[in-house]
Image (cartoon, rainbow, N blue to C red):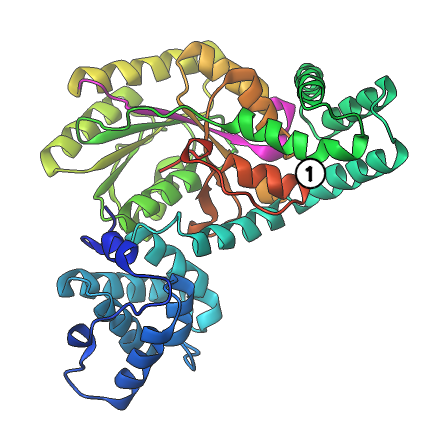
Amino acid sequence: MGFFSGIKQFFKQVHPASAPPSQHAVAAADGAEWRNALTLKLREADSRLSVWLGIVLEGVTEADDVFRQRLHFLLEALECPPAEADEFVRNFMDWITRMEYVRLEEFHSELQYRLALALDLEDEEDERNRLFLKLSYSLARTRELFSRRLDALFTAHGELTEEFWEEIEELFILADVGYDTAVELVARLKKRAHKDAVSQASAIRPLLRAELGDIFRVQRRITAVNPPEVVLMIGVNGVGKTTTIAKLAHRARMQGKRTLIAAADTFRAAAVEQLGIWAQRVDADFYAKAQGADPAAVAFEAMDKALADGVDVLFVDTAGRLQTKVELMEELAKIRRVLAKKHPGAPHRSILVIDATSGQNALSQTKLFNESIGVDEIILSKLDGTAKGGIAIAVVMNFGLPIAYVGLGEKLEDLRPFHGGDFADALLGMTPEADSPQDRTGS
């Protein structure tokens, strides 16, 4: 359930050609002509969030009283509970003020992102298309290297030969898939080509897309937890762990959840202060002790606070470097033990953040953390700044761990659920296919 109670069901019931708002909900108390005019336009429009937002904000250029009225009008039109609508508008206007934004283009994308989360509409086709465009843009450098050379390879070869397979293996390695992974991927492609009786090089692209779809497909799992949900955030320094925690907390807040961020990285200078600033920005509760405090004690006391305060999600930040790897892993294991002692089942998820720009180093980090303390999910940060997007393939093939989210930029809205099929399409320059829910991870 998102921020607004029951709204997703309302969306499902509306036929694409029918109208969102009821006359009763929108019959303006002030009888303003603009409200009546917008009501008619909305009733005639396609039932898509972006379309409705475009209609309501037509002519609006900045975050003024007109913008506030129009946003409130849209929420009224969707029959959102008045108190929740008021809180959404107030929180968003406060955020605009903190960010010192004025022009609509500065915050329009964030507004649509927040509404999609609040209305639980991230899987809506329109929002999926918007995400695909951003993913495709973020993978541009990787695709330029990979897809262009793939096209050249198809042009140079007619039938499938050993020379072709050797060259495509080299191409995978150049995309930072890694040698062993590249060998395995070629073997799987050969098997698929033989099974489908494919003999021409030009027919390999859709086979590769299908193979990547299978690689990224994840099994359904039980996601229910004994509240509060506890998420242990792990990863080396410099991968973007602090901002990733803030983005996760922001997503949870927009879904109507109360969040608490615990600063258990007490070793890195300014780590506590930086995390505290981010917690304030995303309206999350925050718990910390002085720099140099026992990280396990911070986690234990934060767990106590989360239970006492009725928190929905607790995010526990951890150190990324101590004097030795052994010391780091022992510290992380200690944190896990104290969380489980205080709250059976915790941590419910251990999420490893890895930097897409680090290439093969991300593999060694995944191996180290997974073998030492266990990893449940991966977040691939900084995907927008790399030509090494193939590391996503390598991580999943080597460790069988699901990629939950990918970082596509610096804004709060730029942490998005990973969709394996969309990733494959964006990488290969293909049109998105409609995949089953098993192709998706994230929440």
Q: Is residue 351 magenta?
A: yes
Q: Is residue 382 visible?
A: no
Whole-percent x, y for residue 346 in the image: 24, 21
Which residue lies under the disc numbered 1?
A: 387
Q: Please say whether residue 120 is one of the residues in the magenta stretch.
A: no
Q: Residue at x 87, y 31 (%)?
A: 158
Range drawn in magenta: 344-361
Can you see residue 171?
yes
Determine whether the residue tagged by mark 1 lies in a helix, strand or loop. Answer: loop
Residue 374 or residue 45, whichever sits in front? 45
Residue at the (27%, 48%) spot, across then down: 255
**Quadrant placement of the C terminus:** top left
Residue situated in front as seen by the camera: 42 or 64: 42
Residue lying at the far right of the rendered structure: 156
Task: Residue 44: give x, y in percent of width and height.
Answer: 36, 75
**Could you say which quadrant of the image residue 161 lies in?**
top right
Looking at the picture, which amino acid does disc 1 mark? Ala
Q: Residue at point 41% right, 13% down?
A: 329
